[in-house]
Amino acid sequence: MALPPVTKSVAVSCGPFEAWTHFTAGLAGWWPLDKQSVFGAEAESCVFEARAGGRIFERSVAGGEALWGAVLLVEPGRRVAFAWHPGRPPHTAQEVRVHFVASEGGTRVELEHVGWESLGERAEETRKAYETGWDITLQAFAACVHKKHRPHHLP
């Protein structure tokens, strides 16, 4: 039985290309490593190589790397898709698709996480965790974008 995708969205106050750039090249600046990482307290940074075939991975303070996934599709300013298996073997990967849609006042970032069946008997439990996990992650993304784009007022 196929499980439904996890779908989430968040609005940010910048254009689609800038939102896409924050999401990909700026990953280390917004990803909530303290809550979502393979290395836990030993996590130091993460990287999104924004090209087809690029890696998404995390680095530990000791210099270790944990692969999160592989970039499948890159359309700057429009969308990105990646295989997703943080801390798990690649054959258990799902696919995450992220679209950047121009909207009044900025961009709507739409995320769809599909392919839960690759996890076998752990699929339902893992999908449930991502229902809230992606909320945390996208809120961290939006907060970072907002911080970079809030108006500066003169004293």
Image (cartoon, rainbow, N blue to C red):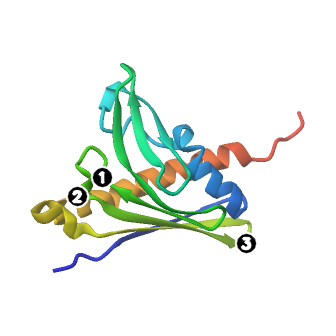
Q: Residues within 10 Å of mark 3 (few under 14, many from 20)?
A: few
**What secondary structure is marked by label 1?**
loop
Q: Is residue 20 visible?
A: yes
The answer to which quarter of the image holds residue 122 is: bottom left
Quadrant location of the N terminus in the rendered image: bottom left
The residue at 49%/40% (across/down) is 47
- As shown in the figure, which amino acid type bears the numbered disc 3? Glu
Q: How far, Cα to Cα, is label 3 from label 2?
A: 38 Å
Q: How far, Cα to Cα, is label 1 from label 2?
A: 6 Å
Q: Vertical placement of 41 versus 38: above or below? A: above
Residue 104: assigned label: 3
Disc 1 target residue: 85
The residue at 64%/49% (across/down) is 145
Disc 2 target residue: 92
Residue 106: assigned label: none
- As shown in the figure, which amino acid type bears the numbered disc 2? Thr
Q: Residue furthest right?
A: 154
Q: Are marks 3 and 2 in contact (CB under 8 Å)?
A: no
Q: Are marks 1 and 3 in contact (CB under 8 Å)?
A: no
Left-right relation of 101 to 69 = right
**What secondary structure is marked by label 3?**
loop
Q: Vertical placement of 4 versus 47: above or below? A: below
Q: Are marks 1 and 2 in contact (CB under 8 Å)?
A: yes
- As shown in the figure, which amino acid type bears the numbered disc 1? His
